[in-house]
Each structure stands twice: as C-alpha cells, then as structure tokens.
Image: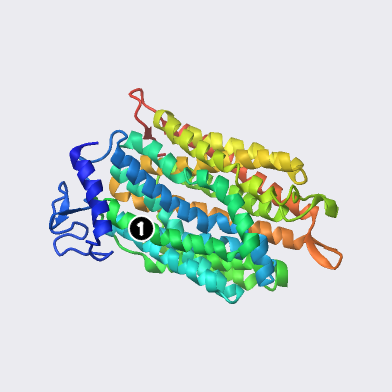
C-alpha cells in the first residue's frame, strides 16, 4: 500500500474518532460530489484531516493492498447487514407466522424484496447521478428505520410496512458492487465482487444456529434488533472510510415509471396471495389492474429516453443475463422459504414430508452449513470469470441448481439429503449473483454501472417475490386438515418443488444461449456480441 493510500485510510479513521465530520449528505457548490472544490484526482481535505476522496482511473486498485482489504471488509459488512434483512427472517419465519396468526409466509418473507424491486432501479439512477457512496448511506439509514418499525409493529400489516421500508437494503447490495467497479480494475474487480457479494455467507454459518436459538429464547424481534444496529454502524463506516464516485452521469429520474412498475408488481403478487384464500375469480380485479399498470409502464418506457428499467436496445446478452438471474435466483429463494416450512414439520406426523428433529437443528443445518457454498460459489465464480468470462460460470451455477432441486423430491423427509441439496443450491446462489453482477460490469460503461447493476438486483428481487408467492399459493391450495389444524399436503410440497425445477430448467436453456452469445477474443479480454 502506498503512503498516500495509508494516510487516506488512517485519516478517515481519525475523522471517525475525533468527530471531525460534515453532514452525511454534503452538496458542494462547485461539484455535486467533490468536497471543498477538490479536483477529481486529488484528495479532499478539511483542515489537516483527510476526507475520503473521489475515485479516478489513476487511483483504482490493480492488486490487493491493506487499503483494498479494509474497503472490502466494509462493503462485506454492508452485505452482512443485507443478509440479516433478506435471509435471517426466514430462520424465524414459523415464529413470525405464529405471532401474527397468519398462514401467509410470502408477505412476511418477501415484502422487503418486493420493495427492493420497486426502489432499486430508481436508486440506481440516483446513484449514477449523485454518487454511489452517498446513496448507499441513505439506503442504510432507511433500512435501520424499517428494522425499528418491524421491531415495534403491533399488527401484521404494520410489520409488512416495516419490511417494505427495510427493502432499501436490497439496493445496498448492488451499490456495493458498483463501488467495487469504481475502485478496482476490471480483472481484480470480478474477484472482489465475488468476495463482497457472497463472503457474508461465512457469518451465516454460525448466525443461523444463533438466530434460531435466540429466537426461541427472546422472540423473532431479535433479528430486527441486529439488523437495525448493523445498518447504523455500516452507514457510519461507509460515509467516512469509502471514496465517492468521480464518474457521474446526469440522468432523468423516472418516478412515474417506478410507481407504475412497483404498483403493477404489488397488485400481481397480491392476486397470487389473496386468490388462494378468497378465490381466484374474486381476486381477478387485482391481477387485471396489475397487468394494466405493467402494460402502461411498458408503453411509456418505450417513449421516454431514460425509463426506470430500460430493456430496449440493451443487447441480447444483457436480456439473457437478466432472464437467467430472475429464474435462477427466484427458484433458489423459493427453496429457502420451503426449507423453513419443512423444518417445522416432523416426519412422524405422517404427511409424507418433514425435516424437524435432531434437537431442533434442522433449520440451522439447512440454512447455516450450506452458507459455505455461497462463499465458495461466489468466490470461485469471480476468479473463474476473470479468465473465462461470467457466462460459463452462470451456466454452471444453473446446472447445479437444477440437480439440487431434482434431489429435493427425495429429500423432503430426509435431512441428510436435504442438507446436500441445500449446499448445492447455495453454490448456485453464490455463482448466479456474482456472475450476474460481473456480466453487468462487462456490458455496462463505467458511468452506468449502478444503473445496470440495479437491473440485476431488480431481477433477483422480482424472481424471489414471484416464486415465493406462487409457492405459498400452491401450498395454501393443497392443505389438509390434521387434528383440526390446516397443514400443507405432500402434493402441495412436491408441486412447489416442481415449479422451482421448471424455473431452473428454463434458466438453463437461456444460460446456454448466453454462453453462445459471448465471444472471448484471443487476447483474453472479454467482449460481447450484441445480436
């Protein structure tokens, strides 16, 4: 690490200790991101103390250094916080269902992802315009507020509102990827992206068992206490110890498009949720209204220069990438929801499925130990992508997911088989997320990294939301009465798995087409044919 880099990182720490800081959202009169009229290639200072600088092509990391390790650790901590928002509630999902007296797991589990799907494209464009670090701090603060609402929620729908506020954390994930692309040269950036997006799973190994134990002892609320505290800590660290982007793009913020897209998605998933309870015909107006909103959004997106999600003239590789991500990660997330429900049922109940037992360790084994797979999948796919390009690793991840989901047909009542399948699915998750973001990095120019990465995150969120709601609706439509209680039937569980398998198979076909669309020249650098 150079003397300049060392002074920069120590200066940021010094600011944090001494309280020498400015507002979290400082707007300079001369430039929207620079502090104190600094030039792009200079550090900005206040008095004698260094403030985090903007990045430029001359300061991007080409190799590992202590400064890069420190920055990577901060971004990794951000994604650990994201994990407590997205994954940790699944661990205590049965407790939340009992507390609120509901059989709608998708609303409790996926409402944050739904909000993330709505907000991510807007935040991506705002980040390209005003700076990724600044917007990342904003999303972390909003996520902390959402955790507080969930913690204090007296009713189900107040809780769901809190989860939707927490959905700002979904944007944090793609913003960390955008920051990696800003501070690292492309080849190193692929490896760092793998570490940042999946390294948080290392902590999931222990925290899964810990949250399960503490949830029994103190209630599901503990998850949201941890999420809120992490959001506050990471907001402070990001603000003072990470650089701001120097490549800004003036852009139009399509609020109307975001509202139409978000409203259409929300109404459609509401149809899936309420249709199984009140009748598909009775809930049909929700579906029609949702499809109408999505149709209006699509028409308007073709007429304005910068729609909230721009799928036009993006090229075949990006479209294929987004489709593989929405199907593959959606299928994976829906299997996590199923694992949580299976772990609460004993095979002795005679339903034809169930993984409870072993001293209550089922959920820890299903969601904890396989966290290693997410780390391995993300890190290895990042390293391999630097040599082969991200398309082949994405195809390999989909293949693993297909095999794992097929194996679940035999694993619904066998914990060892289910753990193996969960591990393979976690490899899939790490590979797909890392490869998806790396593919976006290959296809997008530097000034559009946040915008294109946000579209990857939107696909992750949409896939998760829709397949979770579809799975929950299938389970609710195939319930049986046992000792006066409504329980999921084996038919519903197997149909649920079949839907996930179909999603992986379709994603596999698209991944093969993506590999064929990618061209690797002889000089080793990746380029993509737009067809």
Where 470 falls versus 381 (above or below)?
below
Identity of the residue drawn at 81% across and 50% down: 347
Where 426 falls versus 223 (above or below)?
above
Foreground of the two, 303 or 49:
49
Q: Residues within 10 Å of mark 1 (few under 14, many from 20)?
A: many
Query: Percent position (x, y) of residue 325?
Result: 51, 46
Observer able to see residue 250: no
Toward which corner of the image does residue 5 lie, by quadrant? top left
Q: How is the image coloured?
A: rainbow
The C terminus, quarter of image: top left
Foreground of the two, 18 or 157:
18
Foreground of the two, 342 or 224:
224
Identity of the residue drawn at 67% across and 56% down: 471
Query: Percent position (x, y) of residue 193?
Result: 40, 41
Observer able to see residue 474: yes
Q: Is residue 511 left or right of residue 520?
A: right
Identity of the residue drawn at 70% across and 56% down: 341
Identity of the residue drawn at 58% across and 59% down: 89
Q: Which residue is mark 1?
A: 136
Q: Secondary structure at mark 1?
A: helix
Query: Percent position (x, y) of residue 132?
Result: 31, 55
């Amino acid at each position: 690490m150079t003397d300049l880099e060392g002074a920069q990182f120590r200066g940021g720490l010094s600011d944090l200790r001494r309280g020498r800081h400015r507002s979290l959202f400082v707007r300079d009169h001369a430039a929207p991101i620079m502090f104190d009229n600094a030039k792009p290639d200079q550090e900005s200072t206040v008095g004698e103390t260094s403030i985090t600088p903007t990045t430029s092509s001359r300061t991007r990391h080409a190799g590992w250094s202590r400064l890069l390790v420190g920055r990577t650790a901060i971004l990794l901590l951000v994604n650990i916080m994201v994990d407590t928002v997205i994954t940790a509630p699944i661990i205590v999902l049965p407790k939340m269902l009992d507390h609120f007296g509901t059989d709608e797991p998708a609303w409790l589990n996926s409402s944050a992802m739904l909000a993330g799907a709505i907000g991510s494209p807007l935040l991506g464009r705002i980040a390209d315009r005003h700076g990724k670090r600044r917007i990342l701090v904003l999303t972390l603060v909003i996520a902390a507020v959402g955790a507080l609402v969930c913690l204090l929620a007296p009713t189900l729908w107040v809780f769901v509102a809190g989860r939707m506020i927490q959905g700002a954390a979904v944007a944090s994930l793609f913003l960390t990827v955008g920051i990696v692309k800003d501070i690292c040269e492309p080849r190193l950036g692929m490896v760092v992206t793998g570490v940042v997006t999946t390294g948080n799973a290392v902590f999931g190994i222990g925290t899964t068992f810990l949250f399960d134990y503490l949830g029994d002892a103190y209630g599901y609320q503990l998850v949201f206490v941890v999420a809120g505290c992490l959001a506050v800590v990471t907001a402070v660290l990001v603000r003072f110890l990470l650089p701001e982007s120097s490549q800004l793009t003036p852009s139009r913020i399509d609020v109307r498009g975001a509202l139409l897209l978000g409203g259409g998605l929300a109404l459609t998933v509401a149809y899936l949720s309420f249709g199984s309870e009140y009748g598909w015909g009775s809930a049909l107006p929700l579906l029609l209204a949702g499809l109408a909103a999505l149709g209006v959004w699509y028409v308007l997106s073709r007429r304005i220069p910068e729609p909230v999600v721009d799928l036009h003239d993006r090229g075949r590789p990006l479209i294929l990438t987004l489709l593989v991500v929405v199907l593959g990660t959606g299928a994976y997330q829906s299997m996590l929801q199923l694992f949580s429900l299976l772990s609460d049922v004993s095979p002795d109940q005679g339903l034809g499925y169930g993984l409870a037992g072993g001293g209550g360790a089922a959920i820890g084994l299903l969601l904890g130990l396989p966290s290693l797979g997410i780390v391995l999948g993300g890190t290895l796919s990042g390293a391999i992508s630097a040599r082969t390009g991200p398309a082949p690793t994405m195809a390999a991840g989909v293949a693993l997911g297909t095999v794992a989901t097929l194996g679940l047909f035999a694993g619904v009542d066998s914990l060892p088989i289910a753990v193996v399948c969960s591990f393979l699915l976690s490899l899939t998750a790490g590979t797909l997320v890392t490869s998806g973001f790396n593919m976006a990095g290959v296809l997008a120019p530097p000034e559009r990294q946040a915008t294109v990465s946000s579209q990857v995150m939107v696909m992750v969120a949409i896939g998760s939301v829709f397949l979770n709601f579809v799975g929950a609706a299938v389970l609710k439509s195939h319930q049986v009465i046992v000792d006066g209680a409504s329980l999921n039937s084996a038919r519903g569980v197997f149909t649920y798995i079949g839907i996930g398998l179909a999603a992986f198979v379709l994603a596999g076909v698209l991944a093969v087409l993506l590999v064929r669309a990618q061209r690797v020249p002889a000089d080793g650098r990746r380029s993509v044919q737009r067809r």
